[in-house]
Amino acid sequence: MIDLGNLQELTEDDAPLMQTLLDEFLNTTEEDLRSLDQAVKKKMHQEIASLAHRIKGSSMIVGASQLIQLTNELEEAGKRAENDKFESLLSGIKECYSGVSEAIRKL
C-alpha cells in the first residue's frame, strides 16, 4: 500500500521528521479530498485537475503507488473535462486513501 523508501531517503531516516511529514500528508490530503469532493460535484474541471495533481505529489512522498495512479487519471480527466469519469475515480481515490491512511496510522 505504501513504500516509505522515498521518505526515508528524503529525511535521511530521521524518525521524528518522517512522522511529522506523514502527519502533514494525512491532514492536507484529507482537506484536499473534501475540496475535491466539492469540485467533482460542481464539475469544476480545472480545480479537479489541480487538486488531483496536488494529492498525487504528496502521495509520491509516501510511496502510495495506487493512489498516485488514480490521482493521475483524475488529473488527466479533469484536464480533458471527462465528466463521466469523475465520480468513479473519486470513489477509488477515497477508498485507496482510506487504506493508505490506515497503514500510516499503524506505523
Image (cartoon, helix red, strand yellow):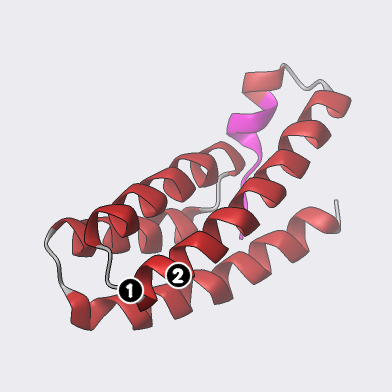
* Label 2 sits on residue: 38
Residue visible at 76% across and 65% down in the picture: 102
Q: Indicate whether 92 appears above or below 2.
A: below
Q: Indicate whether 50 appears above or below 42.
A: above
Residue 83 is drawn in which quadrant? bottom left
**Marks 2/1: CA distance?**
6 Å
Residue neighbourhood size for the residue with mark 2, other residues' Cα within 10 Å, grouped as few (<14), some (14–19), many (≥20)? some
How far across and how far down the image is residue 86, in percent? 30, 75
How far across and how far down the image is residue 39, in percent? 38, 66
The magenta region covers 1-8
Residue visible at 45% across and 63% down in the picture: 36
Question: Going by the image, does 31 lie left or right of 58?
Answer: right
Question: Going by the image, does 78 lie left or right of 72?
Answer: left
* Label 1 sits on residue: 42
Question: Going by the image, does 19 lie left or right of 66?
Answer: right
Q: Nearer the viewer, residue 8 or 48?
A: 48
Residue located farthest toward the left when viewing the structure as drawn: 80
What number is the disc on residue 23?
Answer: none
> Which amino acid type corresponds to the residue marked 1 in the rendered image?
Lys
Tag 2–tag 1 contact (CB < 8 Å):
yes
> Which amino acid type corresponds to the residue marked 2 in the rendered image?
Gln
Q: Secondary structure at mark 1?
A: loop
How far across and how far down the image is residue 40, in percent? 36, 72
